[in-house]
Amino acid sequence: METVAQTGIWRETKQGRAALLLGLSLGYFMVLMDTTALGVALPAIRADLGGGLSGLQWVVNAYTIVFAGLLMSMGALADRLGAKRVYSAGLAVFLAASALCAASPTLGALIGFRAVLGVGGAALLPASLTLLAKSYPEPAARAKALGIWAATTGAAMAIGPVAGGLLADGLGWRSIFLINVPLAAVSLIVVGRLAGADAGRGRRGLDPVGQATCIAAIASLAYALTEGQTRGWTSPVVLGAFGLFALASAGFAAAESRGRSPLLPLCLLAVPTVSAGMLAGLLVNNGLSGVLFALPLYFQQARGYEAHAAGLALLPLTIPLAFNPILTGRIVVRIGPRWPMTAGFALCAAGVLTVAAATGESGYSIHLVGLLLVGFGTSLAIPSLMAAVMAASPPEWTGAASGALNASRQLGATLGVVLTGAFIGHAASTEAGVRQGFVALGLVLAAGAILTWSRIGREQRR
């Protein structure tokens, strides 16, 4: 058997790096497949466990709130304790929480276990990106690896809605969580064998005040925006949540400016590509998650589709995510990230607005065109965004940068669900709410195109 050469802790052969990339991609494949499969199963969950639109929003957002709130701390832990340790622990938590979700007796229990699932997912993502970045230190090789990583995980976006619909119709929604068991086992074995013992950098501390205020700010904002739809925007509880958001945001800013080991180092925000990239990440996930939350409800409630048919209807969006990121990685290597990012946002905006026009009596063909535009746009924007931010970040802050970027993306995902849910909840029908919500999402994505064109790569052009 071939002896695998090592430099430091990394297995440096081409085959070893490729296998490690596969193992890391598989871990995030599991996270994304779980999320996308859940979307088409939401009506089945409501039929089984009860709850209205607000309850379904919390099933989705309980995960993304915790995920977003912990990502920056998990990036710091990956730097401090070692990315391999954090990745493996995250997989174990994700596996256990998946089993608990499958056994949930009530909607409240499912929401709580989904929050625990977010802890595992938050550990997986920044640790996997840190392992990938250190395994591929060359910029060109890293951009290609990121493209493959995004394409592998993009396959989860393609498979998730279809698999979720088939499982929900055939075996029940609980089976969606049980498929994580073999996926987690394979990823643990591959990463455990190919990523060497990683001691991390013990000199980097944690930021408990920043972590607490970060989660408080995200959770209170999501609560206020979600519950304001049902309790009323002048409700004392909702106004109190907005007040807590303001206080927590101010506390987070103070903690990051004064702390010795901040979750979000200010030096990162001083880099134009990093700061703009974080905002762009929020905007692109706002659009994508809003679409993935609202369209399955629309197809099932307004068009009368079965869950598996709703999953199939989403394929024009998800299939490009499975293969186009590889091409995007090559484009980024040749011309840089600014052009493909801007084009990606523009295509997403055009696609969402096309889908908005397709509601009503129109046939599925208009949906197909709009979803294809969204799929190709997203698969251009996200890999370019990751490559740009990782390349612009100082090497010693790779974990913090990946955590901050993906935290902003998950915050955007939470807000996308809240935004589309608000339009659906206040409209006369699901169809009207989806149309109005998608017009709003289109404007958000158009703003992303302007942002990326004007800000990404600015430091290199000086």
Image (cartoon, rainbow, N blue to C red):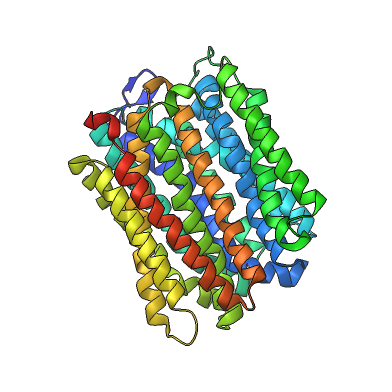
Question: Would you place residue 265 above or below residue 194 in this image?
Answer: above
Question: Would you place residue 402 above or below residue 380 in this image?
Answer: above
Q: Quadrant location of residue 143?
A: top left
Q: Which residue appears at 46% of the width and 50% of the height? A: 283
Q: Which residue appears at 57% of the width and 23% of the height? A: 256
Return the x and y of residue 59 as percentages of the image width and height: 68, 57
Q: Which residue appears at 78% of the width and 55% of the height? A: 108
Which residue extends farthest left? 334
Q: Quadrant location of residue 254?
A: top right
Which residue extends farthest front? 234
Q: How many marks?
A: 0
Q: Which residue appears at 43% of the width and 31% of the height? A: 130
Q: Is residue 429 left or right of residue 353?
A: right
Which residue extends farthest bottom? 361
Q: Is residue 53 left or right of residue 439?
A: right
Viewer-proximal residue, 127 or 253? 253
Q: Quadrant of the C terminus?
A: top left
Viewer-proximal residue, 446 or 25? 446
Q: Is residue 38 visible?
A: yes
Viewer-proximal residue, 148 or 277? 277
Return the x and y of residue 45 as percentages of the image width and height: 69, 67
Return the x and y of residue 401 as percentages of the image width and height: 45, 30
Viewer-proximal residue, 26 or 117? 117
